[in-house]
Amino acid sequence: MTVASIHRGLFSLLALTATMSMAEAKTDIIVGMQLEPPHLDPTSAAAGAIDSVLYANVFEGLTRFAADGSILPGLAQSWDISADGLTYTFKLHPGVKFHDGTDMTAEDVKFSLDRARAADSQNAQKALFAGIADVAVVDPTTVKVTLSAPNGALPFNLAWGDAVIVAPESIEGIKQNPIGTGAFKFDAWVQGDKIDLVKNAAYWGTPAKLDKVTFKFISDPTAAFASVMAEDVHVFAGFPAPENLAQFAADPRFQVLVGSTEGETILAMNNKQPPFDNLKVRQAVSHAIDRQAIIDGAMFGYGTPIGTHFAPHNPDYLDLTAQSAFDPAKAKALLAEAGFADGFTTTLKLPPPSYARRGGEIIAAQLREVGIQTEITNLEWAQWLEEVFKGKNFGLTIVSHTEPADINIYAREDYYFQYGTPAFKALMADLNNATDPAKRSDILKAAQKMIADDAVNAYLFQLAALSVANAKVQGLWVNAPTQATDLTAVSWAE
Amino acid sequence: MIAFRLGLFLVLVVLGAAAVSLVWVPQDVGAMAIANKLKPPTLAHPMGTDHFGRDVLSMIMVGARTSIAVALVAVGIGMGVGVPLGLAAAANRGGWLDEIIMRGNDLVFAFPSLVIAILITATFGPSAVNAILAIGIFNIPVFARVTRGAALSLWTRDWVMAARVAGKGRVRISVEHILPNVANLLIVQGTIQFSLGILAEAGLSYVGLGAQPPTPSWGRMLAESQTMISFAPHLAIFPGLAILFTVLGLNLLGDGLRDALDPRLRRSR
């Protein structure tokens, strides 16, 4: 037997074992993500990374987001709305158990909602629960939620990761050991590395197809690229480097999923700080910016231009991009009218994501063309939250607002870009009181128009949801209607 | 001598590129042409274009300016403060001033320089000025030590004795007799510190703590090229080579200068 034939024999043996293992579909998956959650309680922190791991997988709410952004029943199988629109009666699925074996009943729902809306609640989205006046247990599978004013958006509000149902006895340790009702159970968390979930055999609904899920946290874009290429991770949700996607798309081992998120990426202006308190200056900035150049340069073509703070895939979206079309000559004229014929100098503070860092450099170049000089400062997230978001110490900044349907932030006077005019507040109050879909749509459109007319911020583009996955993985969400990596329907193709 | 000439040549090329960039660059580094991005090297763009469609050659020429300016001022700070300290310490050998200066030196030396540089730029905000200060501070003890070491042996010479007998004070002797005799060493040390300064500046901008955009900087160019290295390697190769050749050139130049200027080496030959 020659060396060559030994080799050939080895090869056929290897090939044989390879085919044998191919026959059985894999039941585990490794999902790469850029950000690691600070802890594991989605009801007490704003960090989207918590929901990216736990939403729909471990924790469920009364209602839930579907992959297309519509609202589906979750733990509540149905609900009735009283004629005056003030009372919602939720009928819960019977026989739902928490991962620790206890029953999920109306008491747990009351506990979760009361905890979220309590005065001392740590919930990051308390506004979602602001209209709730009372939560009452009717019987173990019926909950009555009473509102102080009609609110057609309640089922939408309750679908958020901040509104998931938690077990009272698990609250103590929820940040390290989350106990939910979902199709996966929390197994282990190796901080700085990964989180393991395992299949919940006692799940009340359609069981998960996978037995084991591992979330691996890889913050560096270069390392993320290498780990996908080496097939160390099977899916990378929210791939951080859009420039690498063309390579994955050209490789038959991978599929690239390009969808849309709820992320309106904006060049925010400090509306109370001169010169941005001047409408003409804000309009000039809006006209100085070439959105397509930013999308091509910073996002390698992924993204949809927007002209207001609203997601283009939403049926109520108004395309107002023409109102602030790229027009440097007009921008210069507006600046001259505002008394800044020679331009001015301001700060541009940039958080870490590439849309901000790269987009910032492009915007700085575009603003320079009309005479506005910017001093760029690159900040880490913690510094950005401190200086810009809380401290309001900035002229310009770039950030993507990833919360769904969040135009109401413009009603907050103390929000970091400091708009909150009485007219806009009145509009939002009308919206909350309206239950008629046609009327809600009209109000939403008026609101979009108002902030575009006032050029509160320069609206850049809708952030794309970019994920890379092994070509055999199926059932992943393409769009990101909320922060989530729903793996309950994911499986490996044969 | 070949090494010295090669070093001199490389350094002159870099200095020349930086000098030329003051009056002319192939393409304005502030101008972006997104449609023209990530082009491989061509005649129009000898080093290709980056992800914003900027000319890489122009970026490197202007980046040379940033590197040289940061390293030069940092060496200036080191010499300006370190040399007088070293002279003073040598003139007061064994005295309390000597102790204070040299223990202070040890204190600064005890900290890893780049870590402190990161601390300084993180505390006072990332900028080219803070990078200069951070790198400059760590040049002070280097020059103080070199100066003191060389000056100590000079203080025992007869001609220094003669000067003292003639009634000259310590300060005058230090300035008129010691300093000219340690200048050779300082030039050699300065060249070495200059190359270290260029490396430190590149390192700090690589982690985002050096010169801020849009000011081009070699370190940041390297950092930005990272995710594109697989399809646009020219973005990493050219800034990398720029750093390599500059540091290599300065080191060769420093070695050559030492051979030519250091009296001890000269005598042993």
Image (spheres, coloured by chain):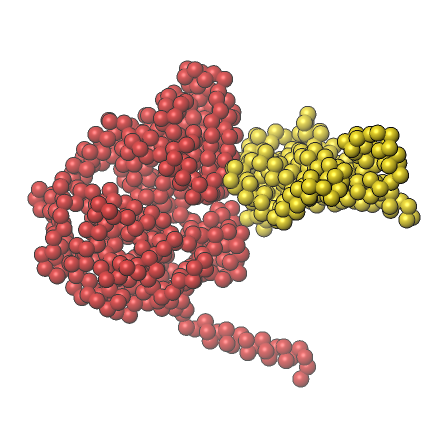
Chain colours: A red, B yellow
What residue is at 48 percent from the left and 46 percent from the top? A242
The quadrant in which residue B217 appears is: top right
What residue is at 22 percent from the left and 51 percent from the top? A115
| Left or right of residue A360, residue B15 in this image | right
Residue A84 picture location, percent across and down: 8, 42
Q: Nearer the viewer, residue A295 or A427?
A: A427
The quadrant in which residue B176 appears is: top right
Residue B71 picture location, percent across and down: 67, 37
Residue A297 picture location, percent across and down: 50, 38
What residue is at 30 percent from the left and 60 percent from the top? A173
In which quadrant of the rendered image does the N terminus of chain B lie?
top right
Residue B94 picture location, percent across and down: 73, 44
Residue B149 versus residue B27 in the image, above or below: below
Residue B163 versus residue A274 in the image, above or below: below
Q: Nearer the viewer, residue B147 or A265?
A: B147
Q: Nearer the viewer, residue A90 or B249?
A: B249
What residue is at 25 percent from the left and 34 percent from the top? A444
| Left or right of residue B115, residue B81 in this image | right
Question: Can residue A486 be seen from the camera position used here?
Answer: no
Question: Can residue A22 be seen from the camera position used here?
Answer: yes
Residue A135 versus residue A97 in the image, above or below: above
